Image (spheres, rainbow, N blue to C red):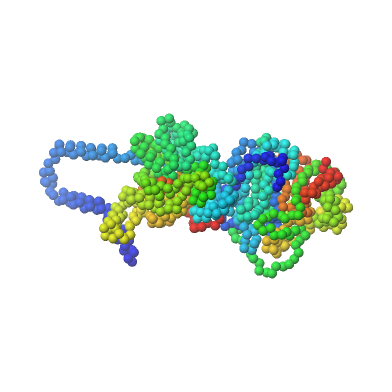
Amino acid sequence: MPDIVLKFVKLGYQYLVNHVLALLLIPTALGVAVEILRSSPARWNSFQIDPLHLIFCSFLAVFIATVYFMSKPRSIYLVDYACYKPPVTYRVPFSTFMEHSRLILKDNPKSVDFQMRILERSGLGEETCLPPAIHYIPPTPTMDAARGEAETVIFSSIDSLMKKTGLKPKDIDILIVNCSLFSPTPSLSAMIINKYKLRSNIKSYNLSGMGCSAGLISIDLARDLLQIHPNSNALVISTEIITPNYYKGSERAMLLPNCLFRMGGAAILLSNKRRDRSRAKYKLVHVVRTHKGADDKAYKCVYEQEDPQGKVGINLSKDLMVIAGEALKSNITTIGPLVLPASEQLLFLFTLIGRKIFNPKWKPYIPDFKQAFEHFCIHAGGRAVIDELQKNLQLSAEHVEASRMTLHRFGNTSSSSLWYELGYIEAKGRMRKGDRVWQIAFGSGFKCNSAVWKCNRTIKTTSDGPWQDCIHRYPVHIPEIVKI
Amino acid sequence: MVSSPMSEGLIYDKKLSSVGPAYATDPDLVYEPRNLDLAMKLHFLRGIYYFERQAFEGLTILAIKEPMFDWLNKYPVTSGRFRRAESGRAYIKCNDCGVRFLEAKCDKTLEEWLEIRDASLEKLLVSNQIIGPELGFSPLIFIQLTKFKCGGTSLGLSWAHVLGDAFSAAEFLSMLGRLVAGQDLGPPFDLAQSLTKSVISHDPPKVAEDPIAVKRVEPVGDNWLTPTKFKVEPFYFDVTATHLAHLQSKVGPKFGPFEAISAIIWKCIAKIRGKEMESNVVTICKKSEEGNKVYGMLGNTQVVSVVKADFPIVDAEPSVLAKLMREEAFDMRDKIDEAMARENGVVDYVIYGANMTFVNLEDAKFYDFEYRGQKPVRVSYWVDGVGDEGAVLVLPGTNEGGGGRAVVAILPEEEIVRFEAELKRERLIA
């Protein structure tokens, strides 16, 4: 009984606070209206309306309106996006990965065992993909093979996007590519410009070294550019090229990425053009970036270095989850006021004041973000990341389903994983007009970046996209430990 | 394996990878080889298909591998790995691990290579791996694609006999050809999910003799290598149509090429081994008339029969031997099955080479494997893991052979020279 009472009290409180303005204005307006009606028609004539005053007031109104509309930031729309679907020939079942590992690391059985334990608990499925060079025993990562992978992933994503949106190469005004670990000369953005014969006055940018959260950094950059360039569109490519980064050594902390990172990529079309407003899928509402690099521990927690044998790999520190938690808290502190309804913000404020003034032992109030968003896309960095965020934000299994299933089907595809997750939600037919989406990405640095989108039109499930042939099998139950 | 100076550097640029089923198999699927399959587990088929340039011309390695994923998807068992049940019986877990794929290049042209016709060199074109020392990490099939200087290609198939006999292997490979030609193979074959055969029997072990067709060897554990006293090597020779005609005149018109060739060879071997060592029991294997297999066309269903001669072979007439082979061969399959069942599938047997073994592969559809419309110009096959008594495989002749036969005799090394001399004397070869 008390539970239901509490629930109603909470609902009542929320309704009250969130609609306070309406609740104040309506009675006031009603009061004024009643007052006017009650007063006699004679009094109406006695109201002297000075023509000068009238003109002045109308000019003022027009002036204020103009200033408001001019200073309003341009609306940025996500017209559409396309994710890369690797062919079945690149598939890596667990057993194959383990067997190859045993042959490659035959002098380090402990490292092999470690990899097996990671894989068993990773949350990955049997259909994740690695590029052809990594299928060899031992892998043969040449520059050519890396470029080949980049071309396959990026060009097929762009082709797919062009087909979906009707985008012509000559119409692309801004091109932003983010790929953290592979940065050839000429850049990947130059590679795209060459292949598609883009315009010579294109504004191209290539972001490298920025980790798994670089996808949202690219979106942020695109947004800023689209503010200064009217009537333009921006093509954003988010990917991670696996070929050159396979760790060939046997240090355990550095073998983790081998087990989790898989092939993937996404191409996103953003626009500020009027005519894209009606056909765009999403409107960009906020991008919030948090960088904890000033803290030494955060800076070093994902660190590329040589192992004692001189082999280069990425060292993941043991404090990763703690640092991720801190970065998330920072990010939430900024994004909270922007997205949370007034009721949650007040509650948070009260408990904050309470903890500071009255009793520090009060439990900090975790705002209920489920009231601010319908969908959550948590970077599929690993099972632990998703578990941690689910716990911290008190999300249900359905909220994190897109993230878990993306991790299962595609593995950790780095910056593009957020787009596979969004694709999952759309493929399931859950995306309705007005729904708000929160994309959260973590990356080396240590960074936590968020993007908030609002769905512009209800999205029908289509027969294209990376999930089209397997969505009917999902969601699947992912066991704690898979027996290989 | 000692590599002669000639083989050094002949095969180079080797690259190893794996090819598996296109789609994820249900992780609980298992395949339990039957008793007759497990009886053959110590034998490994090695086959080489030689193709001229046009077959694989212009194809990148990815383009060659691509259809293999759909091919292996049809029979996920071939990509699985062995495990042992609690009873010790081996079964296959369909874990999609895949078949091993080796790419290599050769310095010689196809023509030059085929002229050499050296058994030890041919071994370079196919994997010599067996299952073991770790069951769970040993592929059942190895495929080696070797590109010759002229563009010709050889496809080496290494096939664990426990999966199926040579007829199965030939048909399985033909499926790849059909897939490449555009034919749809249909959905994967259904499999069971639970182990039904691997029940630990609590009955006291019945003591009975092993059937004559098999030889029980020392337990090999998880390393399926046949223990032999002698080093057994293959020796090839072709029997042309003319020689075959001459042979059949000696033996009599009633008998087919297989019986004729086998009879003469039986006599030759008997002469080499002398009266004390001569084998008056031989095993004969041939294709089963009943077309049914338990798992699609995979499985060991070939007829394994035994012939016993009550008289010395050396002095016998070839026609008598041939008659014996045709009319007095006892089908031993049921007995082998029973023997294996008694031991719960755990015992280690050798069938090829337990007695002198003659395998009739005339009907094996080796030349049916067409790659992009090209048939192989030659197909070589032999078996690894043959026992000390040796084995003889009679294969179909090459396509242009016009009625001849290819014969592979797998014998103890020191017998081969004398064997060749005997063959010449019998005018089986030039």
Locate residue A345, reporting x and y percent. 30, 53
Residue A63: quadrant of the picture: top left
Residue reaching furthest front? Answer: A308
Residue A407 can be seen, yes or no: yes
Q: Residue at x 18, y 39 (%)?
A: A57
Q: Residue at x 33, y 49 (%)?
A: A334
Q: Residue at x 74, y 56 (%)?
A: B351
Locate residue A186, reporting x and y percent. 47, 34
Looking at the image, residue B34 lies above or below residue B14: below
Q: Is residue A228 left or right of residue B52?
A: left
Q: Nearer the viewer, residue A466 or A434?
A: A466
Locate residue B372, reporting x and y percent. 65, 39
Residue reaching furthest top? Answer: A200
Locate residue B82, reporting x and y percent. 63, 56
Q: Residue at x 35, y 53 (%)?
A: A369
Q: Which quarter of the image is occupied by the N terminus of chain A?
A: bottom left
Q: Is residue A3 left or right of residue A133?
A: left
Q: Which quarter of the image is occupied by the C terminus of chain A?
A: bottom right
Q: Is residue A65 left or right of residue B349?
A: left
Residue B322 can be seen, yes or no: no
- Tally of marks: 0
Q: Nearer the viewer, residue B192 or A308?
A: A308
